[in-house]
Structures are given as structure tokens and as C-alpha cells.
Amino acid sequence: MADLNTLYQEVILDHSKRPRNCRALADADHHADGYNPLCGDKVTLYLRLEGDRIADITFQGTGCAISTASASILTETLKGKTLAEAASLFEVFHDLVTGRLPDADEVPDLGKLAVFSGVSQFPVRVKCASLPWHTLRSALEKDSKAPQGPAATTTE
Amino acid sequence: MATLHGVVAPALEAPATGFDVRKIREHFPFLKQKVHGKPVVYLDNAATSQKPQVVLDAVLRFYTELCSNVHRGVHQTSERATEAYEGARVKIQTFLNARAPREIVYVRGSTEGINLVAQTYGRQHVQAGDEILITELEHHSNIVPWQMLCEEKGAHLRVAPINDRGEVILEEFQKLLTERTRLVSVAHVSNALGTINPVKQIVQWSHARNIPVLVDGAQAAPHLKVDVQALDCDFYVLSGHKMFGPTGIGVLYGKAELLESMPPYQGGGDMILSVTFAKTTYNQIPHKFEAGTPNIAGVLGLGAAVDYLNSVGMENVFSYDSALLAYATGAISQIPGVRLIGTAREKAGVLSFMLDGVHPHDVGTVLDQEGIAVRTGHHCAQPVMQRFGVPATVRASLAFYNTKQEVNALAQGLQRVKALFG
């Protein structure tokens, strides 16, 4: 039986109450909006790249504890990483929260992301955890100079 | 009648009317379910309701004993099925106090009922520059069909505002009734806020200006007695699955003269009198609006739900529901950090609230672990959420098989949420 403490670990509660990098980024060259219409989670991700490295990454938004913590830890984890590393972590994170990664300890690069392993036991909350990551992908795929494009990323 | 503010326990404790919630609960098989190892506390009735055994029996009986198409055969089973099917129509007519069975059209639910009116009556009567009037508290199903019609015709959707208690501001509503208004469409009871709208008054004001009124009764029919003649509304929709009947079946009530004047909705079998490639003539009401093989099992289930509600008595249902809502309002609002959303003076069934510092989605997850089912989100009423400046709410919605003990469990669950999120 799933235990709430597996989902709401200390680190997650901390990041949801005191999110890091929670601000707009004035000199962002990429950004995207993410929205989960089912529960009202909203997140906007801002990035500034130097070559293929993420020089700075921030977020803003309103949402549940899981989506807020996920966005916060995402920005902490990805600052300074290359785009290739970010893409790889996207896949690993997705496997983690959907329960396809049985032993989180075996994947060395996960770092703090490992705290989201409990989400796999609460399938309804997977979309909350993965919203910031889908939004990140959307931000990187969009042309940053183009006006706000078609509908924002959703996890529908 | 139970008051809303101040706890009125007597109606819950003393079954003076013979209403005993423990006996009622025994009629509903689902209530024995366990969720995460705990007895289910089902407080999501506004999303869908539980079904009494007699409804389940009626559905099964159709498929095991009466399984035949309706209106189509001379063999006995087909006759018996047709008799049961049309018999249910009469039950619903009586339940709503319509003048005749032909004023009862079977649809999939309230949403389809509203779409039917928008696409037939609406297309017929609404032209460029005309107006349709709804309110700020409507469910998406009573917004989007009208938006689509207005876009198609170049008409305008007008929205009567609500106050901070979640009540329609009646002076503003009246100002929005103009010479261009072709239809008014309002909820009887708000699914997100629980507000009971003064629909009788709204109909009177609208009719004084020759404007017809559609009333969305999806959340009203489970809680209070609906009398369409007393309301004098032109259309009324309800959903079977919200009033203890099966999913996939609902009712559109329309005044006979109106239904007769409207063009058909969907074309096909049963809604015709005769078909040639040169010309087809349409059937009389209500069959004109019922194309194809209907949800026969759903109809029989809905008929059984109506019988069941009649046996309990809608006055008893309303009395018990009101008392339980008053109790729940008192119990939940006492918890520090709780903010009620929707505090109208007249309410039914619904308790929407926020808990300081905790997103509704997280509240819902913790409650779920206790076996408590509530709804979290925008409840298909995004404009309402915007009006109150919230992304979502927690909504507990009651039915006449819920108990004080279940409300207490909800309160305890909220204390658990507060402890976890500190």
C-alpha cells in the first residue's frame, strides 16, 4: 500500500514551500508555458543558453506541491548542464515517475531527482511531476525569437 | 426546513419521516467498497452518484429478460421492452410534473440536452446581433454550446455576474435582458458553488420580455423536487447518472409547442414517419428528437431511479441533504485555514473550499489515502475559478446516503493534511 511519505518526502515538501530559482529571467532566450487543465497547475520556464550549456534556468507558476517541487529541483539540477545532458535526464526522470526505473540508486546522475521515485505509486500525480519537464522540452524546441506560438504545452 | 448557518442536527438524527440513512445505505452496493484498505467515504456525488440495487436490477433485467429493440417489432419481447421504455417516460413526466409524456425527450445527459436546444431552437431563432444570456457560475456545458452558436451566427453571449457569495446579482441580470435577448440559460444549482438560483423569478422576468428560458437541472434533480410547470421554464435538462441512475441517459424537458416548432436534431431511424429519396417526413415529438436505437437499458435504469426516489420522497431527500450540508459547512469552516468558496444563502449539495498553503490537488491525494473521495480541480467551471481568483478548489458533494460520521472523517482528513504540510 502506497505511503504518503513516499510521495511527500521532506525534500519535496521543502522545495514546494521554498522553491528555488522561482523568478522570471529578464535575459531569457527561451521560454514556454505549461498547463495541466485537469488540476490547474501552471508553470513557465525561462532559460538562457551559452552555446549548448544552460547558463541560467528559472521558473514561475502556481501549482500543487509536486509540480512546484519538480520545477524547483529541475532548475537546480539543470543549471550548468548541457542540452544533451538535459535531454537524457528528461528520459530518466520520465522512467522514474512512471515506475520503469526500479532502483533509483543505480542511476548515478539522478541526484535530487531521485526523491520523485514515489510518484510512480500515485499515477494520478505523474502529470504534475512531469509538467515542468514537458514545458522545458517545449521551450527548447520553440524558436525563442518567435512570438508566443500555438497553445501552451499541456500534459493532456 | 433546515437552515444553512448554525448546525441543525434533528433532521439527521431523528428519522421522524421514516428516513433512516443506515437503511438507505444498505440499498447502495458500492458503499461497501474499500479504498486503500479503508471503507469508502464517497463525497464526489456532484461528479456522479451511486446507484441503488433496484437501478442495477432494472438494467440487468433489460438485458436478461427484455432484450429487444423498441418501437420496432410485433413479437412479445419487443412489445414488453417498448412498454417499459415508454412507461419510464411517463414516470419521468410525473416526476417533473410535465403536462404530457411527449414533453420528455431522452438524451445522453444534460450536456446533450443543451446542445440539442442550441442546435435546433438556437439555430432557428438566433440571428446576427442577437444575444444569449447565461451567468458567471455556469458549467462548461452551459457555456460552450452557446459560444459555438454565437460564433456561428454572429450573436453575442452575455454573462450575468455573481457576487462574492456566489449568488447571481439579480439587478445586473435584469439589466442584461434586452430586446436582442433570444434565450436565457441558467443553472438551477451550481455544481462548483452549490448556489440555488431563483429560477422561478428568472423565468418570470424573462417571460415578461418574451424570452424563453432553459434551466440546467443536472445538480438540482438529485437534491430537490423539480416542478417544471411551477417553474414555467421552457426547457429543463437533467442527467440520469447524477440522480442515482445509469450513465449515458438524461432528459430534455420542453414545452410541447416549442418542441413541435423545432427542427429535428439528429437524423435516422425512429425519428421519421416515412422515407423516400424524394422526401422524408419527420415523426411527432418526442420521437422526432430520438434518432436511432436509444439507450434502452439506461432509460429503464432511470425509471427505476425515479421510482426509488419517489419511495424515499424528494421532500425527505431535500430535508436530509440540507441538514447534512449545514452540518458539513459548520464542521469544515471551523478548521483554521479553511476558506469556503460559495456561501450563497440558498445552497444544495456542494461544499467547495480552499485550505491555506495547500494546493487542492495535494489535499485530494491525502484524503484519498484515507478512503475519502472528493473532487479537486476547476469542476468544469473555469470562469468560476477565475472569478474567485483560485486555480482550483476542493469540492465535497453530498448525497442522501452520506452521514455525519463521513463528514467527521473529512474533517479529520483535513487535519491530517495540515499536519503533513505544516
Image (tube, rainbow, N blue to C red):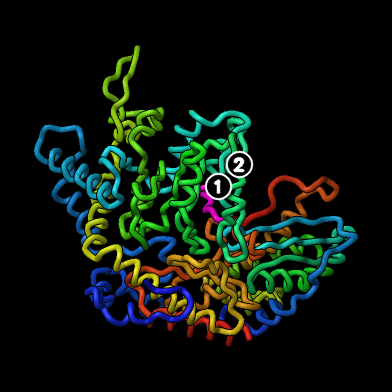
Q: Vertically, is B195 above or below B121?
A: below
Q: Vertically, is A64 above or below B61?
A: below
Earlier in the chain: of badge 2 and badge 1, it is 1
B217 or B119, which is in the foreground? B217
- Residue A107 is left or right of residue B227, and the answer is right
Q: Which chain does tag 2 point to? A: B
Q: Which chain does tag 1 point to? A: B
The magenta segment: B137-143
The secondary element bearing badge 2 is classed as: strand
- Mark 2 Cα within 10 Å, few/some/many (few <14, many 20+)? some
Where does the image place residue B188, in percent across and percent down from the top left? Answer: 45, 55
Question: Which disc, if any, is residue B101?
Answer: none
**Residue that extends furthest to the front in the rendered view of this protein:** B208
**Residue that extends furthest to the left in the rendered view of this protein:** B76
The secondary element bearing badge 1 is classed as: strand
Where does the image place residue B111, in percent across and percent down from the top left? Answer: 45, 47
Residue B305 occupies which quadrant of the picture?
bottom left
Q: Given contact means CB atoms under 8 Å apart, are the residues at marks 2 and 1 in contact?
A: yes
Where does the image place residue B209, in percent across and percent down from the top left? Answer: 52, 38
How many tags in the picture? 2
In this figure, which residue is indicated by the disc labeled 1?
B134
Q: Quadrant of the N terminus of chain B?
A: bottom left
Residue at horizontal 47 percent and vertical 60 percent from the top:
B196
Residue at horizontal 52 percent and vertical 41 percent from the top:
B145
- Mark 1 Cα within 10 Å, few/some/many (few <14, many 20+)? many
Report the Cα–Cα distance between label 2 and label 1.
7 Å
Give the residue type at disc 1. Ile
Q: Quadrant of the C terminus of chain B?
A: bottom right
Residue at horizontal 60 percent and vertical 48 percent from the top:
B159
